[in-house]
Image: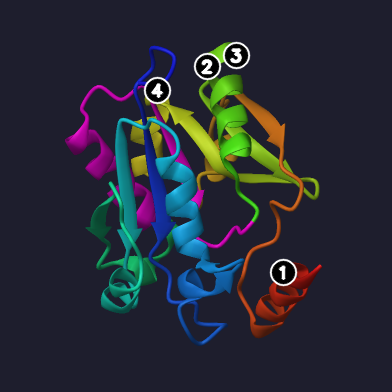
Amino acid sequence: MIQNAKIGVVILAAGSSSRLGYAKQLVEFKGKSLLQHTIDVSTSIDFDSKVLVLGARKDKIESEIDLKEFVVEMNENWQEGMSTSIKKGVLRSQELENELDHILILLSDQPFVSKERIKELIQVQLDKNTQATYSEYSGDIGVPAIFSAEVFYDLKELKGDQGAKKLIHDQELDYEIVKFEMGNFDVDTAEDVELLKQMEEE
């Protein structure tokens, strides 16, 4: 329970990293994998449910991370796009805690996500009493993002490769934004991995 609100967290980590050729979830930065970093940051906050959605390379990934308090949800339909992982994550979260007020969605390949950034998102969401609070970076918005129970149904209705940002365009969503410098840096290619290594040395 966070400030009298029940909040769950979902980490989306089901993709195949096809452009990279191996599991980007396991790319190392500052001594730990990107996914482990996201798990560690999440477990430093008192969430009421913790769900990790895996798909491609599930066994490999699961064998190399410390799940801590996370429950693994397998997405057999990961090839159909991100929406399938969001749906799986929301459904499993509601099974674990059927009175959730909000769900925070994270990706597994944002090396600069931090406890402070997540707590700021949560604080804005609770203070403004809004349907959603997104991160903003490079003039765009996206995850990490947190959603109120009012839009859980809509999250589960996303299709194909639609992410949670699609809700903004589909309906008059009441949302806030929090700036997240470096939030646009994720790992999709060998060049990204090389750049990450360079940042590690700075």
For label 2, count other residues whose C-alpha is less than 10 Å away and answer few (under 14), some (14-19) or many (20+). Answer: some
Q: Are the residues flagged by discs 4 and 1 in contact, CB closer than 8 Å?
A: no
The circle drawn on residue 128 is 3
Task: Give the mark nearer the N terminus: 1 vs 2.
Answer: 2
| CA gap, disc 3 and disc 2 | 6 Å
State the image quarter where residue 80 is shown. Answer: bottom left
What stretch of residues is rendered in magenta? 83-111
Residue 126: mark in rendering: 2
Could one spot residue 160 in this view of the protein? no
Which residue is farthest bottom? 21
Of callouts 4 and 1, the N-terminal one:
4
**Which element type, helix, strand or loop, lies under badge 2?**
helix
Label 4 sits on residue: 150
State how far apart marks 1 and 2 are (Cα).
34 Å
Q: Amino acid at mark 3?
A: Lys
- Asked if marks 3 and 2 touch (Cβ < 8 Å), the reply is yes
Count residues near mark 3 (Cα–Cα under 10 Å), then give few for <14, some for 14-19, many for 20+. Answer: some
Kind of residue sitting beneath label 4:
Glu
Q: Position of residue 162 (x, y in %)?
A: 49, 54
Q: Which residue is located at x 35 percent, y 67 percent? A: 78
